[in-house]
Amino acid sequence: MANQAERSRELQGLALTAFGVQFSVLANSLIKTVSTVPVVQAMQVRFLIQWSLTASTSLVLRYQGKPIYFLGKPGHRLLLLCRALCFAVALLSSWSALRLIPVGDSTTIVYLYPVICGILANRFLKEPLGFSFWSQAGICCAGVLCVTGAGFLDVSSGSYQKGALLALVAAFGFASTNCLVRALKDVQTFEIQLFTDSVMAFLVMPLMLMATGNASDWSGWNLNVFGRLAGATGFGLCALLIVLLGHQLAPASKATLFTYLEVPSAFVVQSLAFGEVPGLQKTCGALLILLAAVYRFWDEASKSRKDTEDPLLAGGD
């Protein structure tokens, strides 16, 4: 039985998740414009920028007396490392997909991950999956099919299919990442992000640069490209930190479904920034996803009010 305090935490987590992903829309839109440099170089620069921001902020928090561990507590390091590696796979696949297919389509396919996350959370974190989860997940999957169906059926669109498969790989990576965040719910939010940025900036990305042969030639960079990447990094970091906190406050099976709100927002930005107006079928798919999230939040808020009025009658989902 969920008590009032727990319901309040969950609602805060759901609201933060829905808000945080809006910054991710802006980040992805800017990343799509950074197409003159290799993806791995863009990722290396992004994580160096992020590390400088998270490390300096963590130093300030440590100076203020906050219990920040720069490399995590010994008992948390394996989970932190797994989270960093899953995030690396997810981000590399997602950024590569953005170069092949429209922002809205890529975002929609990536957002199969809430369903995957819920199933993983049920299997490994023992989070219950009630009717609300399956109904919202079913509607969201229907929305994804509406958005991507035409592209998959067009056999001549090889680049679309390749981009869609990369986005699907990203979905599995993000799902694993969010489950690991929930398993680390007692760890400071900045501590999680600092560990990820450190591993990515100084271990994973340098190795990937050497493996792909992109470590030496940086001739495609200029101030314009760097400025757009810096902007994308800032928006992306805001999204990561807010969504991280949201997943620490609410169960992964619930919070992750609210990241679907990035999909309709992505189509709005796609239309305004790139002039790629979605057709009726894609618009209907995005609206299905939006309505499912609104209904689920209303349902959770109703349960919270019921807890306040009569805590003994309210049950968990």
Image (spheres, grey):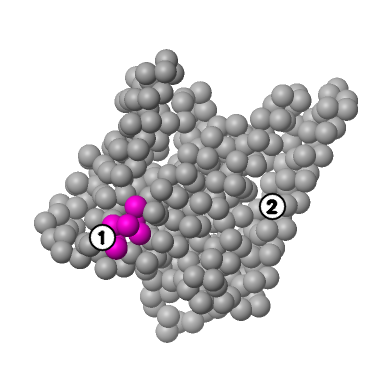
Please check the rendered image and state whether residue 179 is part of the magenta-colored stretch, yes or no: no
The label shown at residue 293 is: 2
Residue 99 position (above or below residue 130)? below
Residue that mark 1 sits on: 223
Q: Is residue 262 left or right of residue 2?
A: left
Foreground: disc 2 or disc 1: 1
Q: Is residue 201 left or right of residue 32?
A: left
The percent position of residue 99, horizontal first and vertical second, equals: 37, 68
Residues rendered magenta in the picture: 223-230
User: Hey, what amino acid is under mark 1?
Assistant: Leu
Nearest to the observer: residue 274 or residue 264 = 274
Pointers 2 and 1 in contact (C-beta within 8 Å): no
User: Hey, what amino acid is under mark 2?
Assistant: Ala
Residue 304 position (above or below residue 36)? above
Splitting the image into 4 quarters, where does residue 69 fall?
A: top left
Residue 98 position (above or below residue 199)? below
Residue 181 position (above or below residue 207)? above
The percent position of residue 62, horizontal first and vertical second, equals: 38, 20
Looking at the image, which residue is at 43% across and 44% down?
A: 237
**Neighbours of disc 2 within 10 Å: few (<14), some (14-19), many (20+):** many
Q: Pick the quarter of the image with the N terminus.
A: top right
Please check the rendered image and state whether residue 229 is part of the magenta-colored stretch, yes or no: yes
Looking at the image, which residue is at 75% across and 24% down?
A: 3
Nearest to the observer: residue 88 or residue 169 = 88
Splitting the image into 4 quarters, where does residue 64 fall?
A: top left
